[in-house]
């Protein structure tokens, strides 16, 4: 009798399990056309001091909240546009972990999704001005390297930072971007990047008195004195918040070295190599398509000190988070103003872009 009851209980348990699995299979994953990837929000998703997420929540909008306990912040979703919004948390580690968690979440169908990272950054006044928005084709990692202390740098070396696998700075030939020892950068789909730029190059960006006051302190930089504009410009990605003329020059040289002279260091940010690493692994499983990724970074501050200001003074002002001359709000606005036309174009003409990448001949 005990054996019979045990077999009966086992059969009942197996039947319940099968029914639960069948029910799970009946629930289709939410379709996603575009994932909007932001890196931080200061408070609530709406109605208070904004971070990168708030404009998307309020204006796109992203009305539905979806729990995301395995990530940094809950998700938001627009069921009509089929746009999913995520806040990864700041830094490469949080960026990588949050995107991997999203990519592996069975609640979402990301197989055809486009990914856009509209986020703020430091900006090189040699190339562009604060409040400007740069579409990146190259994301180059600054962290993965050898480095010796500045006091030990040989007199004939321009820097103490050396590529892994090389014995001195900028030794030729440059290693492959992706190799056994790690990943030193990513080359995004140039056709898609150019398409996004052409679509948004005439977007008029805010030029506020605060921005004009900031620019006036950089008379030696013609591009840094221009009103905010949309451009194509590449990113130096690093966890260290570097600043100053010497490190700015290193960023320019570093990007040029790793891209064979094709890239131009324009913005500096932390998260994007981590985000792209996770997307690369997810692409290997066919969960996402890496060629559908866009990175838009907007200038919240300059990477070098103003005239008559030292690098130490610039560091102190950044550490104090003094927003007296901040381009923080205009850079947030630029991220939405330039990023949202791309999102709306993709979602509004989904039958066109679902299986055909804009900017390509496929």
Image (cartoon, helix red, strand yellow):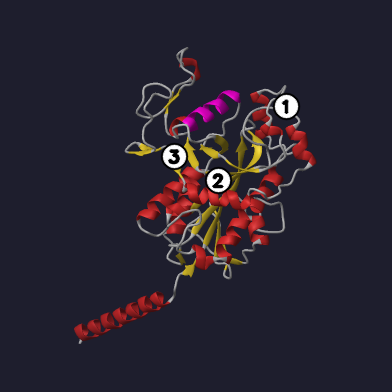
Residue positioned most to the right: 209
Picture coordinates of residue 217, whole percent (x, y)? 74, 29
Q: Determine whether, in the image, residue 180 is placed left or right of residue 108.
A: left
- CB under 8 Å between discs 3 and 2: no
Q: Residue 90 carries which label?
A: 2
Viewed as shown, does residue 172 lie left or right of 102? left
Q: Check disc 2 and report its element: helix, strand or loop.
A: loop
Q: Would you say residue 230 is visible in this rendering? A: yes
* Magenta residues, dominant SS class: helix
Q: Which mark is residue 219?
A: 1
Query: What residue sits right under mark 3 in the picture?
Result: 185
In this view, 262 is above or below 57:
above
Residue shown at the point (62%, 57%) measured from the top left: 341
Q: Does the magenta stretch include residue 254?
A: yes
The one of 196 and 314 positioned closer to us in this rendering: 196
Q: Is residue 67 depicted above or below 88 in this figure?
A: below
Identify the image quadrant of residue 106. bottom left
Precedes in sequence: disc 2 or disc 1: 2
Q: Give the range drawn in magenta.
A: 245-256
Seen from this angle, which residue lies furthest top?
155
Q: Residues within 10 Å of mark 1 (few under 14, many from 20)?
A: few
Left or right: where does residue 97 sit relative to residue 9? right
Disc 2 and disc 1 in contact, CB within 8 angstroms: no
């Amino acid at each position: 009798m005990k054996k019979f009851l045990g077999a009966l209980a086992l059969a009942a348990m197996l039947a319940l399990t099968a029914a639960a699995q069948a029910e799970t299979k009946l629930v289709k994953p939410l379709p996603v056309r575009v994932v909007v990837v932001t890196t931080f929000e200061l408070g609530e998703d709406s109605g208070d001091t904004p971070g990168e997420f708030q404009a998307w929540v309020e204006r796109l909008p992203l009305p539905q909240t979806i729990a995301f306990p395995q990530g940094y912040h809950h998700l938001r979703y627009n069921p009509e546009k089929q746009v999913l919004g995520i806040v990864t948390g700041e830094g490469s580690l949080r960026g990588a972990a949050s995107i991997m968690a999203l990519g592996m979440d069975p609640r979402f169908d990301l197989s055809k999704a486009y990914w856009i990272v509209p986020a703020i950054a430091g900006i090189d006044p040699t190339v562009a001005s604060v409040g400007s928005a740069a579409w990146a084709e190259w994301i180059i990692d600054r962290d993965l390297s050898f480095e010796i202390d500045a006091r030990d740098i040989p007199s004939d070396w321009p820097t103490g930072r050396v590529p892994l696998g090389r014995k001195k700075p900028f030794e030729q030939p440059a290693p492959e971007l992706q190799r056994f020892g790690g990943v030193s950068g990513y080359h995004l789909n140039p056709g898609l990047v150019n398409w996004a730029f052409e679509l948004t190059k005439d977007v008029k960006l805010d030029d506020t008195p605060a921005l004009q006051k900031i620019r006036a302190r950089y008379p030696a930089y013609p591009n840094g004195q221009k009103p905010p504009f949309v451009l194509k410009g590449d990113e130096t990605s690093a966890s260290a918040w570097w600043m100053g003329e010497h490190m700015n020059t290193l960023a320019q040289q570093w990007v040029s070295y790793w891209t064979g002279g094709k890239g131009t260091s324009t913005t500096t940010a932390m998260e994007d190599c981590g985000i792209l690493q996770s997307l690369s692994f997810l692409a290997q499983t066919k969960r996402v398509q890496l060629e559908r990724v866009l990175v838009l970074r907007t200038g919240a501050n300059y990477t070098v000190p103003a005239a008559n200001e030292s690098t130490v003074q610039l560091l102190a002002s950044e550490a104090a988070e003094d927003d007296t001359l901040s381009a923080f709000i205009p850079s947030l606005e630029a991220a939405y103003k330039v990023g949202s036309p791309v999102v709306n174009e993709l979602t509004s003409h989904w039958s066109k872009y679902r299986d055909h990448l804009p900017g390509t001949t496929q």
